[in-house]
Amino acid sequence: MALDVDSIRSQFPILQRTLPNGKKLVYFDNAATSQKPLAVIDAMSDFYKNYHANAHRANHTLADESTAALEGARDRISKFFGTTEGQMIYTGSATEAMNLVAYGWARYNLNEGDVVVTTEMEHHANIVPWQELSKERGIELRYVPVDTEKFTLDYDAMEVAIQGASLVCVGHVSNVLGVRNDIERVIKMAHSQGARVAIDSAQGAPHEKIFFDDLGADFLSVAAHKMAGPTGIGCLLVSEAALSEMGPFLTGGSIVKRVTLEDTLFQEGYAMFETGTPRMAEAIGWRVAVDWLEENIDFDVAHEHVQSIASWMATRMREIPGITVFGFPERKEAIGVVSFLHDTIQAQDLGYLLDAGGFAVRTGHHCAQPLMEAMGVGSTNRASVWIYNTMEEAEAFVSHLESIVSRFG
Ligand code: PMP
């Protein structure tokens, strides 16, 4: 079964856009954030127009409707990720989800000398919280290196690094290279050492169906906005065992049973972590995004579509004089990301020149400076592909890049 890309594209209004310079938009910045189908935009607008009210703790119709939508979304989204609503904590982002692991689990369970393992390949969201905790608690932080010939994690070094570790935190897919890490192996390795394991799936979940309970990770972070959902919401999926070891992170209203001037009794389970006014509109939008994905996308077929476009682009781009492509987007398991540089056209300039042709790519360190350092570069241009991109767009991109290089290279 092929993807019905025409039908998919017709449901994303922004893809019809023409830029101020008259060029048709070609959106290759999907690893930063995906675009949204009309169904998601309409659902959020419908909430604000017709039943917006603060969820929970009220006895009026709108609040009941809003609460039902918020909690119904949790049920639906958690099922989509192969788990149950009790295991899903709404967060503001994937970054906040990783901070919740650091401050809601690690801060309660780790002390001076305990070991946290992460990798050189991570987004800053899976490095900086550990550095901060390490300063606060004297936790030892170990990094698994990247093999910069093969562009994979060094799993032999990981075997050594996780000896005696309490927590192992690994990205599912690299946002810079599109490398899909062997998270199943990492989870087994970590558990064999008695360590808890956290997977940063900000880039994995948009490309691969997650079955959280079967996967066996203790924590998994997701960002809705990278998978057709709205900005401002994500979640942390947590195993029952890990959840029972967590304590409050952001404190205040909504997460309490009783507050006196002396002390506070907190709610239990996910309710202990969702402080303040819930993200109602965002949860409603995300639920519709999940419905939309299930109706329109077979994830295996989508992966083939995305991978074949990125693979074709990488192969053709390597033939352009002066262009270096990092990693191996051609690998079957690679996930739609092509990071590249030209040897004389500066990355920022190349980004502008591509934009002048209508092509939206991202330029910079992609919040992965340790990986950049391991690769010996300060930044890259990054084209990232998702379900609505086409081979025609890829061809137009490569031909525009060729003309930039022949003019300015
Ligand atoms: N991890 C990875 C691998 C990412 O690519 C990103 C987003 N660029 C994040 C975490 C953070 O996601 P968010 O900005 O939605 O918090």
Image (cartoon, rainbow, N blue to C red):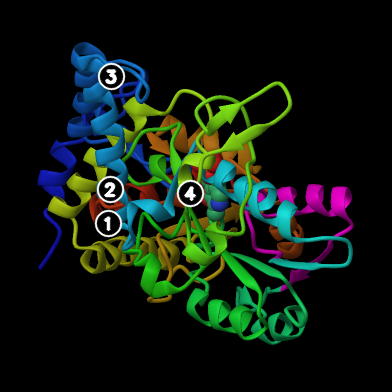
Label 2 sits on what residue type? Answer: Asp
Distance of label 2 from label 4 (alpha carbons)? 15 Å
In the displayed structure image, the side of residue 50 where residue 267 appears, left or right? right
Above or below 408: residue 13: above
Label 2, residues with CA under 10 Å away: few <14, some 14-19, many ≥20 = some
- Mark 3 or mark 4, which has the lower sequence index? 3
Label 4 sits on what residue type? Answer: Gly
Distance of label 2 from label 3 (alpha carbons)? 18 Å
Label 1, residues with CA under 10 Å away: few <14, some 14-19, many ≥20 = some
Residue 63's disc number = 3
Q: Is residue 80 magenta?
A: no
Q: Which residue lies under the disc numbered 2?
A: 75
Secondary element type, mark 2: helix
Distance of label 4 from label 1 (alpha carbons)? 17 Å
In front: 118, or 23? Answer: 118
Range drawn in magenta: 119-145
Residue 79's disc number = 1
- Mark 4 or mark 1, which has the lower sequence index? 1
**Mark 1 and 2 residues: CB-CB less than 8 Å, in contact?**
yes
Residue 269's disc number = 4
Q: Closer to the camera: disc 2 or disc 4?
A: 4
Quadrant for residue 336, please give it: bottom left
What residue is rendered at 77% in x and 61% in y?
A: 110
Label 3, residues with CA under 10 Å away: few <14, some 14-19, many ≥20 = some
Distance of label 1 from label 2 (alpha carbons)? 6 Å
**Mark 3 and 1 residues: CB-CB less than 8 Å, in contact?**
no
